[in-house]
Amino acid sequence: MTSRVIEIDNPKTGEVVEAVYEHPFIVRLCHWVNAVSLFVMVGSGLQIFRAFPSFGAKIPQKDLIHWPKALAIGGWLGGALQWHLTFMWIYIGSGLLYLGYQTFSGNYKQVLFVPRDIPGVWPMVRHYFFFGPKPPTREAYNPLQKHAYTSAIILGILSVLTGFAVWKPVQFSWLAWMMGGFHYARIWHFIIMWAILAFLFGHLVMVVLHGWNNFVSMLTGWKKDPQYTSK
Amino acid sequence: MTSRIDSRKFNRINRRELLKLTPVIALGAFAIPALQTPLLKAGLGFSDWASAKLFRSGHLAFTFDDSQLTPFSKFPINDYDVDDPGVDLDNWNLSVGGAVGKAGNYSLAQLQALPKFTQNTRHVCVEGWDAIGNFGGARLSHFLKMIAADLTARFISVECADDYYESLDMATALHPQTLLCYEMYGQPLTREHGAPVRLQIPTKVGYKQAKYLTSLKVTNVLTRVGYWEDQGYSEYYSL
């Protein structure tokens, strides 16, 4: 899919700036709906975790960590479950809409990490973390971004699958079995959440570092002065 | 050939694209106190509806080897009031009523006369812990036939010696692994574990599996669902 490139002419200053349409409406809608749902899922999930903050036996109970109530959503186990079992549908719905749209529109090519992207990862890592030179920008997402976003999508899918195994270990018994049964599915669900939060931290740092024009592109779809032009 | 537009038109395009995202604001309804309760109730209700659709009568919960059992001394006991409500075991009976042909009081001996099934299944608590236990008892489906229950009725409701109460959808009540359990690990139920009879339902969450049963009713109407459900927990909560 070719990105739409336009030139913007400021009549007052005479300045001409390029802009590219990077993010279709459905992608932006799903991004923000999913962001809100993820916030609620993590918050309520942590309140659920507080009810039994351990992955060992009940007797004797050895808590892994005491997560503060103030950093959780729901107030109590019953409330947290209401949030979690309500927002899971919004989280899943926006995820499926995103995946379906990306696949059927062909727009997935912008974000999907493929073998061709592998050589480009290290130069980006070196630039971000080890003062390496800035590799030329050729497309909307550089190889490291594609890697991060593709991983995040996979983690999102795993958060749903592990969640289903915890929610219905009998009806989804084959899914739970693949994870080692209910007890281990609950552990995987917890681990996947932390992996998603690690991605989220990196994502937010990068968004802040890459400036206003870049951020706005996830609101309006258009990125001014993109420093690359897609054919 | 790249098209060129002036910046005012670009700003209008941007504003329009931004306005397209207003549906996201709809999620803010959950933050409004007056709307929050009905929205969450609807959400939980939808989850319960989906759970009922996913339930398969023929699908069995995993059973385990004896080597995988949680040791009896480490099998947790949960209650909401007391562990032992002081049931008079010598004079106990199960009071049966509702849409049944043979209402009345049933003794433990009558339950024990029905075929006994034992199973090593996983008990999952809503809190998040689980334990694998050995349970023995009569199938609830056999008991329902014994009392000539109307099997087209929607619910079974039970009451307990500690004022706990629960209910069960008929499909789960008829599931082969749903037991009127009177034994654990080959021994009669101890008082703390629900003597003399409890529900044991490997296809449901722990709080549905009421202990120290005193009465059982077959009904189409529930005036109350269950101790925890009536405080906001899921009504259907199947595993």
Image (cartoon, coloured by chain):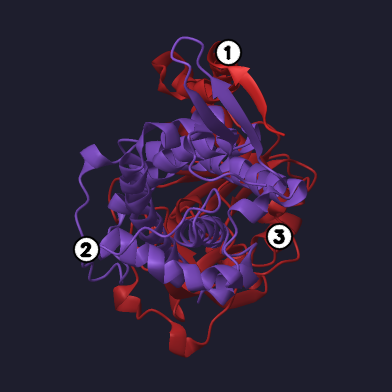
Residue A113, can we see it?
yes
Residue situated in front as seen by the camera: B125 or B30:
B30
The amino acid marked with disc number 3 is: Ser
Q: Which mark is residue B12?
A: 1
Q: CA distance from mark 3 to mark 2?
A: 40 Å
> Do the CB atoms of the residues marked 3 and 2 lie less than 8 Å apart?
no
Q: Which residue is mark 3?
A: B141
Task: Answer left or right for A22 relative to A205.
Answer: right
Residue A16 position, x and y percent, is: 51, 25
Q: Which mark is residue A63?
A: 2
Q: Is residue B228 visible?
A: no
Tell me which chain appears red: B
Say which element carries label 1.
Answer: helix
The chain holding disc 1 is: B
What's the distance in space between the residues labelled 2 and 1, CA to CA?
55 Å
Amino acid type at image mark 1: Arg
Q: Nearer the viewer, mark 1 or mark 3?
A: 1
Measure the alpha-carbon separation of dots 1 and 3.
Answer: 67 Å
Q: Nearer the viewer, residue B24 or B10?
A: B10
In the rendered image, residue A167, in percent from the top left (x then y), is placed at 53, 55
